[in-house]
Amino acid sequence: MTKSRFHSFAEVEKAFRFQRPDLVDLLLEIRNIVIKVSPLAAELIHPRGITFYDPDKGGTIKGGICFVDILDNCVRLRFGLGVFLKDPKSLLTGEERLYMRHMDISSFDDAPWKDIEALIHASANLNGFGKGS
C-alpha cells in the first residue's frame, strides 16, 4: 500500500487555525477535491495556503496541480499551467501572466464546485508541458 503524501486533517486544521474559518472551509473543500481527483498527489503546507503537485511528474511547477492561497477576503485557486486548461465558463483570470491563471472564491455556497473539480482534474492530467496525458 502506498503511503499517503497528504498531511492528516488535524495537521491541516492546526496549520490554519488562525485563518478565517469560512476561508479554511473553502481550502479544505478544494483539498478534498484534489484528494479525490489525484490521490497520489502530494501537498506542501505554507503559512497562507497549500500547494498540490504530482511528485511523479516533477516538483511544484512541472508537477503542479494547483495552489490554494488564503487571502484577506477570499481563497485564490491558482494553476501554474492554467493557460493550457479548457475554461469554457471563463472562470480563470490572470492574462498578464505567461502561464498561470487563477480564480478567487469568496463564498462556499456560490463557488462553482463542479467546474472547480473539472479544472483540478484537467490540471492533474497535464503532463508538465501543457498537454493532457
Image: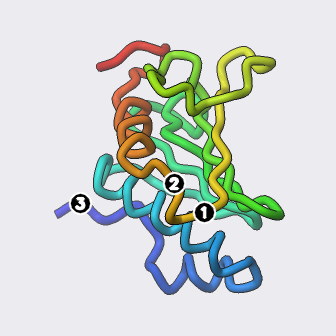
Q: Residue furthest front?
A: 110
Q: Is residue 132 left or right of residue 101?
A: left
Which residue carries the number 3 mark?
A: 2
Tell me if residue 130 comes above or below residue 43 in the rendering: above
What's the residue type where badge 3 is placed?
Thr
Quick one: quadrant of the N terminus? bottom left
**Which callout, 3 or 2, points to the residue nearer the camera?**
2
| Element on which disc 2 rests | loop
**Which callout, 3 or 1, points to the residue nearer the camera?**
1
Q: Is residue 113 left or right of residue 15?
A: left
| Element on which disc 1 rests | loop
**Residue 29 coordinates in the image, percent (x, y):** 46, 65
What's the residue type where badge 2 is placed?
Ala
Residue positioned 64% across, 40% down in the render: 103
Give the colour scheme of this rendering: rainbow
Residue positioned 61% across, 73% down in the render: 24
**Numbered mark located on residue 111 in the image:** 2
Q: Number of callouts in the render?
A: 3
Q: Quadrant of residue 27?
A: bottom right
In primary-sequence order, the first of circles 3 and 1 is: 3
Tell me if residue 22 comes above or below residue 95 in the rendering: below
Which residue carries the number 1 mark?
A: 107
| Element on which disc 3 rests | loop
| Cα–Cα span, label 3 and label 2 | 32 Å
